[in-house]
Structures are given as structure tokens and as C-alpha cells.
Image: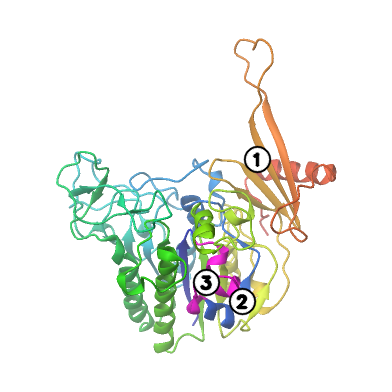
């Protein structure tokens, strides 16, 4: 029996794992354990540079820019970005005999009865949530905590009606000018508030609640004959940066470092549960992040000397490596040799095809359009992925093939003279070309010296963008 546990953090940079960052100002012993006992993809990527599209790509094996979401993220209360009937990691595994659960932050859209501030009926089930996308069990929250609705959800029901109102409150990170909290006291009237919140919701307890619910579900699932899959998307270290009191002061990187130490502790609790149940040997644990570190990484360098993005350029929302090159760790003791490293490029969209190969299943033509299996890499074999697309939160694109990466910057050129009536302004395009093998920090733009490579990658990007898929159907 192979148990699959997918742990997904939120806004965690490559340098926020101490085993991957020798100069880290905090230690992550449990994440380091995954490095020591498993496989590290040093060239692993999220499928986008912000929350919603990366989660879509992970669960469906398809780039989110192929949907109606061309930039940014979705809110908490609107139709789900994953349409009913589309294959997900959960539905693939469920259809092959797995128990499936999601515990944590969804942020792909779901629909509640009524609208904010009027006509809400919290006694009715919500629709378009995880249990309609292949998960047998769901417990979590709708989206990030800077969006309403703030309450825990169980299956398709609200646990406590969010009948009160709140807004962001001053936070605990002094060097972060927009640090905030979502915490009592809450208000009865909307007034200047914009977040619907349940009376018993406290931001600081969310990681603890998710972990305890996950451990409980793992114990129940492991007692049954069927294998299981748990998707555990944490809310950390995304804002609000809110370590519980027992973790405060534990790092050399302020509240952010303390929050990462708590996150690592929660991962350790999951690993201990597998150990205690004596199922760790045949359990696959995948750990990664939805995108690079929030822009506060800059202030952390000044305040604490910690680089959340490691050696990579920029962070969340950016097409530079710091925006999408993330921790990508896999432990599976029965199969993977501990302490392994792969320098082959992989994307989170590839998990679907990898699971399908492990199951001996063929993906249909309308699933996993951008998913290439990395299963051979788990046993030490080299893999060579085709082109990978990187996508910024502002809708701009980059393409990676082999060692080369092309960033295409498009905008609107300024016109000279009188503009013809009704004529659109011509597009303004510039290019950045980097050789990531020689220059992983993207410091030297080589586009002028390599016009043929620029032309090749630009044409390939256009082909993938306009075609239905980037990975051929076998």
C-alpha cells in the first residue's frame, strides 16, 4: 500500500528550508529530514507565481492561464476555477481505489448562498467546493485570510456561521509596513469592515487546527484497507504572520522566522503520525510551496540577513526564478534513496502524470495538458522535461527549455504624431534571455548575443499558448 501525503505551504521561498540555505536565520529540522531521507528537486517550480493559479496547476496538471483567470487570484465566494468533471489528483486517485481528503486552504473558488452583507443563509450547503472535485473529505477555509469568508468548513457545510465582521488589524512584524492580523474583537455591523467572520475564528490557531484534523484523518484512513491521499495546504508563511506564542522568539528572523519554525513543527507532527502508525516506509510525502516568498523578503534581508529566495532573483508574482523556483521535496523510503538530489527541471503540474504512471493509468486527452511524469527520477534516473511556461501575476509570460529561459515583456509603445482614429497602440516587446546553468541568479541578459535562441523560444511560447496542451498525448 502506498500512502500519499501532499503538504503545500503558502508563499515559502526556496531559502526558507535551512537544508537548502546554509545562511538561513532559522532551522527547519523536519523539512531538513525530508531532504535527508528523500529526494530534493533543486530545479522544481510552481506552475504560477501566485496562489490560485498554482493550486489549479497542481491539482489539474494544467496551466491556469488556459482558464478564464489570466492574472491575479480569485476571491473566496465565486464559481470554482476547476470545472466539474475535470480530472484532479483527487479524482484520479479516488477512481483507483484511494480514500481522498483535503484539509486546509482551498482558494480556488466556491459558492455560498446569498452575498456578503445581504441574503446570506449559512444553514444551506455551499457548492463548487473540494468534495465536488474528487475529495471524499474536506475540512478547511475558503481562501487566504485577507479574504472573507473566515470560518471553518466541513464537507459542504459551514461549522460556525460567520455572522460578524472584521478587517485587517495591525500585525506583529515591525519591519513590514502592511503586516496585519485577523483576530478578535469582531463587530456586529459591517461599517468599515470587509471580512465576514465567525465568532470563534482566531487566525493564530489555524495551523494547529489543520494539523490536528490531518493527524486524526490519517489515523482513521490508515485503519482501513484502502490506501489514502491527503492534500494539506497550509496558510503559512503567507500573511498574516502569526506564530503561536510558544514559537515566538525561537528564530533569528523575527516573527517570520518564528512562523516558519511553527510550520516546520506542524510538518514534523504529520511525519511523527506516519512513524507512530508504522506506515512511513511505504508513504510518499511531497512537500512544496505555491510560489516564491512575499515581497517582504527584501525587508528581511535588511532586518535579519535572511534571504527567503536564496540565491534566486525576486519573489512572489515575478517570472524571475525567485517567483516560482520553490522547495520541492519527496520522501518515499521504500522507493527513494535518502539524500538524493535531482537537478532536472520539474513543475508541480507534473504530479498528475507522475501519479498516473505509478498507477499504470493513461491520462485522457482532456486531462493533464501540461503534465509530464517525473516518476523515473524517483529511482535515480535522469529525466528531460519539455518546455515549461512561467506566468506572472500581471499576466506576462516566460518560457524555459533546457538551460535557456526567455522572459517576454509586452506593453504599449508610445506613439509619435497624431494617432489614427480607432487604431490601437502598437505592442512594445522586449526580451530577457538567461542561461540558468551558468547564471541561476539571472544577472546577465544574453538576448543580444543569441537572437536565434530568442526567436526559437518566442515561437515555441506562442505555439504552446495557442495550442491545447504542452505535453503530447501518448
297 inside magenta stretch: no
Q: Of the two numbered discs 2 and 3 on the same chain, state the one appearing first in sequence.
A: 2
State whether residue 42 appears in this view. yes
Residue at point 45%, 53% (across, down):
85
Residue at point 68%, 11% (across, down):
417
State whether residue 58 appears in this view. no
Nearest the eye: 332 or 22: 22
Q: Which stretch is magenta?
A: 12-31
Residue at point 55%, 52% (across, down):
48
Name the residue that disc number 2 marks. 39
Q: Dot 2: what SS?
A: strand
x then y, percent, for residue 26: 49, 72
Q: Of the two numbered discs 3 and 1 on the same chain, state the one appearing first in sequence.
A: 3
Q: Dot 3: what SS?
A: strand
Q: Is residue 167 left or right of residue 285?
A: left
Name the residue that disc number 3 marks. 286
- Camera-near label (2 vs 1) is 2
Q: Residues within 10 Å of mark 1 (few under 14, many from 20)?
A: few
* 33 shown above or below 112: below
Name the residue that disc number 1 marks. 466
CA distance separating discs 3 and 1: 32 Å
x then y, percent, for residue 472: 68, 54
Q: Report the label total.
A: 3
Q: Dot 1: what SS?
A: helix
Q: Residue furthest left?
A: 188
Amino acid at each position: 500500500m502506498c500512502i500519499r501525503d501532499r503538504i503545500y505551504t503558502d508563499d515559502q521561498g526556496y531559502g526558507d528550508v535551512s537544508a537548502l540555505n546554509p545562511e538561513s536565520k532559522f532551522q527547519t529540522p523536519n523539512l531538513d529530514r525530508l531532504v535527508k531521507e528523500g529526494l530534493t528537486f533543486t530545479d522544481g517550480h510552481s506552475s504560477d507565481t501566485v496562489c490560485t493559479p498554482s493550486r489549479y496547476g497542481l491539482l489539474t496538471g494544467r496551466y491556469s492561464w488556459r482558464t478564464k483567470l489570466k492574472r491575479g487570484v480569485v476571491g473566496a465566494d465565486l464559481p470554482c476555477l476547476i470545472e466539474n468533471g475535470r480530472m484532479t489528483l483527487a479524482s484520479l486517485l479516488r477512481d483507483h481505489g484511494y480514500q481522498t481528503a483535503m484539509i486546509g486552504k482551498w482558494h480556488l473558488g466556491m459558492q455560498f448562498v446569498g452575498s456578503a452583507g445581504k441574503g446570506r443563509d449559512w444553514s444551506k450547503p455551499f457548492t463548487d467546493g473540494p468534495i465536488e472535485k474528487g475529495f471524499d473529505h474536506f475540512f478547511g477555509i475558503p481562501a487566504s485570510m485577507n479574504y472573507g469568508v473566515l470560518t471553518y468548513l466541513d464537507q459542504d457545510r459551514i461549522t460556525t456561521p460567520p455572522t460578524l465582521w472584521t478587517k485587517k488589524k495591525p500585525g506583529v512584524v515591525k519591519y513590514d509596513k502592511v503586516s496585519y492580523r485577523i483576530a478578535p474583537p469582531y463587530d456586529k455591523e459591517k461599517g468599515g469592515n470587509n471580512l465576514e467572520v465567525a465568532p470563534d475564528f482566531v487566525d493564530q490557531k489555524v495551523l494547529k487546527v489543520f494539523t490536528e484534523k490531518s493527524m486524526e484523518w490519517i489515523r482513521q484512513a490508515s485503519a482501513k484497507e484502502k490506501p489514502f491521499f491527503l492534500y494539506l495546504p497550509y496558510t503559512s508563511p503567507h500573511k498574516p504572520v502569526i506564530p503561536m506564542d510558544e514559537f515566538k522568539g525561537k528564530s533569528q528572523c523575527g516573527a517570520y522566522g518564528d512562523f516558519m519554525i511553527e510550520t516546520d513543527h506542524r510538518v514534523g507532527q504529520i511525519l511523527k503520525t506516519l512513524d507512530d502508525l508504522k506506515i512511513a516506509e511505504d508513504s510518499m510525502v511531497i512537500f512544496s510551496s505555491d510560489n516564491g516568498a512575499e515581497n517582504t523578503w527584501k525587508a528581511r534581508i535588511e532586518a535579519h540577513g535572511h534571504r527567503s529566495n536564496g540565491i534566486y532573483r525576486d519573489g512572489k508574482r515575478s517570472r524571475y526564478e525567485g517567483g516560482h523556483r520553490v522547495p520541492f521535496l519527496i520522501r518515499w523510503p521504500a522507493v527513494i534513496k535518502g539524500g538524493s538530489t535531482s537537478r532536472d527541471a520539474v513543475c508541480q503540474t507534473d504530479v498528475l502524470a507522475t501519479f498516473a504512471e505509478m498507477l499504470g493509468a493513461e491520462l485522457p486527452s482532456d486531462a493533464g495538458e501540461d503534465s509530464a511524469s517525473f516518476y523515473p527520477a524517483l529511482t535515480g534516473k535522469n529525466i528531460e522535461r519539455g518546455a515549461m511556461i512561467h506566468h506572472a501575476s500581471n499576466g506576462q509570460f516566460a518560457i524555459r527549455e533546457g538551460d535557456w529561459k526567455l522572459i517576454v515583456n509586452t506593453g504599449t509603445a508610445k506613439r509619435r504624431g497624431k494617432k489614427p482614429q480607432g487604431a490601437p497602440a502598437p505592442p512594445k516587446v522586449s526580451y530577457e534571455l538567461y542561461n540558468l546553468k551558468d547564471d541561476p541568479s539571472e544577472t546577465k541578459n544574453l538576448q543580444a548575443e543569441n537572437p536565434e535562441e530568442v526567436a526559437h523560444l518566442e515561437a515555441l511560447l506562442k505555439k504552446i499558448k495557442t495550442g491545447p496542451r504542452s505535453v503530447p498525448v501518448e
